[in-house]
Image (cartoon, helix red, strand yellow):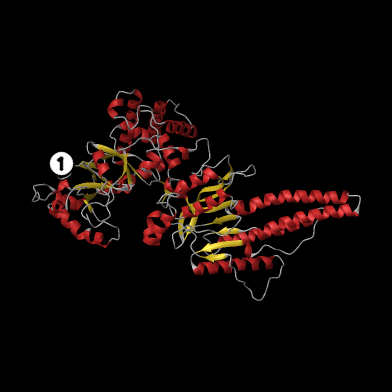
Amino acid sequence: MLIVEPVVIRPLEAEWSEVKERIAAKLDQEKRQKTIRAANMRRREAEHLLAEFQERLRTFTVLDPACGSGNFLFLALKSLKDLEHRVQLEAEALDRGLQRSLPQVGPANVKGIEINPYAAELARVSVWIGEIQWMRSNGFSGTREPILDPLETIECRDALVTSEGWETKWPAADVVIGNPPFLGAKLFLETLGPDYTERLRAAYKGSLPAFSDLVCYWFRQAGELVASGAIARAGLVATNSIRGGSNRTVLDQIAEQAAIFDAWSDEPWVVDGAAVRVSLVCFAKPTAQLSVRLNGKTASSIAPDLTTGTADLTKARRLARAGTAFIGGQKSGPFVIPGRLAREWLGLPTNPNGHPNSDVLKPWINGLDLTRRRRDKWIVDFGDSMTESEAALYEAPFAHLQEHVLPMRRKSTVKGIADRWWQHWRPRPAMRNALRNLSRYIATPIVAKHRLFLWIDACVSPDHQLTVVARDDDTTFGILHSRFHEAWSLALCTWQGKGNDPRYTPTTTFATFPFPTGLSPAVPAAAYAENPHAMAIAEAARNLVALRDRWLNPPEWVEWVHEPVPGYPKRPVPCSDIAAEAIKSRTLTNLYNERPRWLADAHAALDAAVAAAYGWPADIAAERALKELLELNLAGEPR
């Protein structure tokens, strides 16, 4: 009903309110006429107005182009019939009211498209059941033989692409509503098959990014119909990821030619028993009568990211950030090994090539290692250029991959993945080059409840669930960990996971963020080493990190030990079993859930130093800061 009410019922109710006033005026004129003929003329005019609106309802059509078993159509039909009944009662209740007639709204008012034959037939039955239930509960007798008539307005076919590879045409309707299927772009090949995926993406090439989620194709079709005037309004459900990233492209397109007038940005939803978060989006051609509501509250406007406010961050553009932020490496195979095994291999003699196994063994981390406790995982890493023959010279690591990775890669349907089976599928050579001369780098989980940044030793291999920033200066770290960057990243990110957590990527959230003048990642850190603002931010950042590190690993509970060979960072080891148990709960997620006073104070000091670098007061409101940041972004970040 959060879709049906604004798209179907609310505008028809507004129309009826105007018509009812005109009918009441005609009836009032009727009783004031001096002749029967004149009075009868006014009554006929009133009856004509009612008949026109009843005909409007009788011919009003609602299309659900992904109707499933017909839930949306069932509710739309019931709502239309309720409105028709109300119209009759209210017209009759007017002074010198008009006579009621039999209901005319019925199953023909709703149309559907459904690719599954069983679901399509079930939708037809559901609509007829809704008709019969409504008629009986409101005192009308329905037809008895046959109980159900054919309902050809619900078609069984593909709603997106024809077998010849063309966009499908939807049947004519007044409005479009529905809940299209949720399927992420990464699952197309597995779920839809390569032939259909290729045909679908080719049909919409140029109008949608290639890796848009499936639901975006329905939004695109509905948006085109609204823009052309073929339908008046549309309302569709999508996963809440439509608010950002490449998925938001379709809402950007819709906003250019229409107006998003009613939306719920982030609502719970259950699909096949799984809880997800969704966005409900209604759009139409902008008019003076179009009331705008976001999350149930009146709003001045709704941006494509389903927010409202003074700063429309959907206009933000990417800034010059080449070679600064990256997604971590993607393994595609069991390259990760326990620390115990890694240390065993580190203790072996040098290989036949005269090189130690430390050449190809690295500590490894993913998002869980940052938000919880480090799990002592290592990874076999033959780099991005080593040949198979060269890798084979590292006997123990190579034999391990030969046993565990090679069989899996050979079975994979991914093209080319078995060709260089001993290497990570995406080894990120650009990231490796960017980190080569650094002693440490900044990392943050792509998906996390809290936006946390940490220092990671440069020899540690980051997983693809991490965003890596190739900077080693405390100033950059401090700016990224400020409340201003956090607010910016939350406003531009997409959301994911059971906890509906924000996603942080090198493109949408990092590459768009404008740093203070002179402190941009495009500037070498040495160039601003003596800048007072940079020094103040760096000092506050170092203090924050020192306080956090001591809380995470109290020296009374933890001993830092060296690895068997040089070149690796020391690792924390609990001093006793009691310490090992006590330290389990000391994670950054728990720390930021509690946010003790000392942590809040450390962040406040950092935020004040960053605000000063922008020339803002320390207590600047988040909305004002976002507006200022957007202006900097659009002006082009000064170096």
Identify the secondary structure beneath mark 1.
loop
- Residue at the image position 50 percent from the left and 59 percent from the top: 168
Q: In the figure, 312 relative to 533: above or below?
A: below
- Residue at the image position 28 percent from the left and 41 percent from the top: 553
Q: Nearer the viewer, residue 45 or 450?
A: 45
**Disc 1: which residue:** 566
Quadrant into which the N terminus falls:
bottom right
Q: In the figure, 258 relative to 51: above or below?
A: above
Q: In the figure, 177 relative to 318: above or below?
A: below
Q: Nearer the viewer, residue 205 or 1?
A: 205
Residue 421 lies in quadrant: bottom left
Indicate the amino acid at tag 1.
Pro
Q: Nearer the viewer, residue 354 or 475?
A: 354
Horizontal arrangement in the rendering, residue 615 relative to residue 290 (left or right): left
Q: Position of residue 384 (x, y in %)?
A: 22, 47
Q: Nearer the viewer, residue 190 or 611?
A: 190
Horizontal arrangement in the rendering, residue 520 relative to residue 207 (left or right): left
Q: Position of residue 5 (x, y in %)?
A: 61, 53
Residue at the bottom extreme, as displayed: 145
Residue at the right extreme, as displayed: 34
Q: Position of residue 12 (x, y in %)?
A: 66, 52
